[in-house]
Image: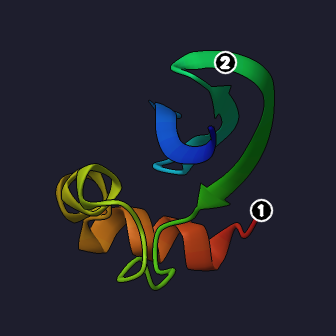
Amino acid sequence: MLEKVVSVDLIEVVESGVIQVRTKTAIMEDGKQISGTFHRHVVAPGDDYAGEDARVQAICAAVHTDEAIAAQTKYPI
């Protein structure tokens, strides 16, 4: 039986407050991974993160302070 499993497997916070998120998509057959791919995206201070994984949301809430958002607006990526 084939199964597609999508999970956030890496969350990194860089000095500017930008959060890098890596999502892994694994194709499983009988409980063993037979294929896998990765996708990365960033969540910058001031971005809407409501649709992110709960762990990413929690980190954004802690890291994306008013100061980080102001700095990001001043020096966008």
Task: Identify the residue under disc 1.
Answer: 77
Residue 13 seen from this side: no
Task: Identify the residue under disc 2.
Answer: 33
Position of residue 53 measured from the top left corner of the image (x, y, whole percent) = 36, 60
Q: Earlier in the sequence, mark 1 or mark 2?
A: 2
- Residue farthest along the top direction in this orientation: 32
- Asked which colour scheme the image uses, the reply is rainbow
Say which of marks 1 and 2 sits in front: 2
Secondary element at image label 2: strand
In whole angstroms, how far apart are the C-alphas of marks 1 and 2? 36 Å
Within-10-Å neighbours for mark 2: few <14, some 14–19, many 20+: some
Out of 31 and 5, give the one closest to the viewer: 31
Name the side, left or right, on which 26 lies relative to 45.
right
**Type of residue at label 2?**
Gln
Out of 12 and 5, give the one closest to the viewer: 5
Within-10-Å neighbours for mark 1: few <14, some 14–19, many 20+: few
Quarter of the rendering containing residue 49: bottom left
Quarter of the rendering containing residue 25: top right
- Kindly check if marks 1 and 2 are in contact, taking CB atoms under 8 A apart as contact: no
Name the side, left or right, on which 65 lies relative to 34.
left
Q: Measured along the vertical axis of the image, is residue 43 above or below residue 59?
A: below
